[in-house]
Amino acid sequence: MAIDRELAAFLSDPPPNDMDDITTTRRLAAILVEEEIAQRGSPLPGMSWHDEVTDAVLNNCQVPIRIYRSEAATKPSGALLFFHGGAFVFGGLESEHERCLRLANRGECMVVSVDYRLAPENPFPAAIDDGATALNWLRRNTEFLNVDHQRIGVGGASAGGAVAAGLALRTRDSEGSWLRAQMLIYPALDNQAETTSIEQFYQHVPWDGERTRKMWMAYLGDDSDNVSPYASVTRATCLANLPPTYVMTTEEDPLRDEAIAYAQRLLLAGNTVELHHFPRTFHGFDIIAPGTLLSELALEEQAGFLRRELGRAT
């Protein structure tokens, strides 16, 4: 197995993600974010974005969000509620700003990025409660936002994929099968973390199985012995009646096997599933290595799924 040569050049300086020193990692990440913002150019033509705060619905908690719009989107447009990655403990609205811009632009839909509360200070179910609050806000404000209420989906990358998948499952159980799509990008789905790929990449750059297990401990807190399927969707016994799903996996990734297994279970349960596997890649490559051939291909495939499911009125 060999990483694509163009991508490998970006592994010489991997992003900070020390699960044993979350405070320092957050500080280093904040510095990188400030540098990125300072170097950020003008928005893509025809694109706009702004920050808002939802009203409080669950636990009397307001949730910061960022709304991305494309003038090319049909009116009313579909909308994707998106959850950033970061091992449940890192990240915020800036983490996947460029991805969200790209998805809104090329996906021809609105993207609403959610600044959910982070572990370990706020363990499960804080993140998924914030997701439910944001989804409830989005659904109640479709007319004001000029969003088609029949074309709303959820999505996320890595730990954000866990939040999106759990929210889709919880929404089905509490409100019925009304979501139009879910997009899971190299998602974290199995808190047991015992797959072959976890062991194969137990110590690996930029992400590995050892940190994956520590990530789940931080997220689950005191509930690690009684795990909800909304936290770790592989524990769900019924996966029927979930929305059409895009699952993306990368080859040298400890989360690879659990994502593939989940896609297979969704398919066997009667759902529509797209599984996109990228060989010679690593976890997070499409964000870590912007502008490379494989990163561009991955982002375009993600946008293509959104165009099909959310971007065009039926």
Image (spheres, helix red, strand yellow):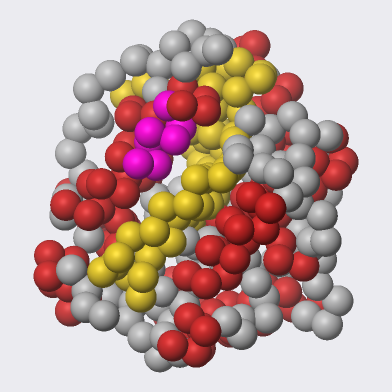
66 inside magenta stretch: no
Q: Viewed as shown, does residue 111 lie left or right of 233?
A: left
Q: Is residue 184 above or below residue 172?
A: below
Q: For residue 142, which quarter of the picture?
A: top right
Q: Position of residue 151 (x, y in %)?
A: 60, 23
Q: Viewed as shown, does residue 312 lie left or right of 41?
A: right
Q: Residue at x 67, y 76 (%)?
A: 191
Q: Residue at x 63, y 30 (%)?
A: 180
Residue 38 seen in render: no
Q: Quadrant of the C terminus?
A: top right
Q: For residue 241, which quarter of the picture?
A: top right
Total numbered badges shown on the rendered structure: 0
Q: Position of residue 272 (x, y in %)?
A: 60, 40
Q: Position of residue 113 (x, y in %)?
A: 51, 41
Front in this rendered view, residue 54 or 131: 131
Residues in magenta?
A: 301-307
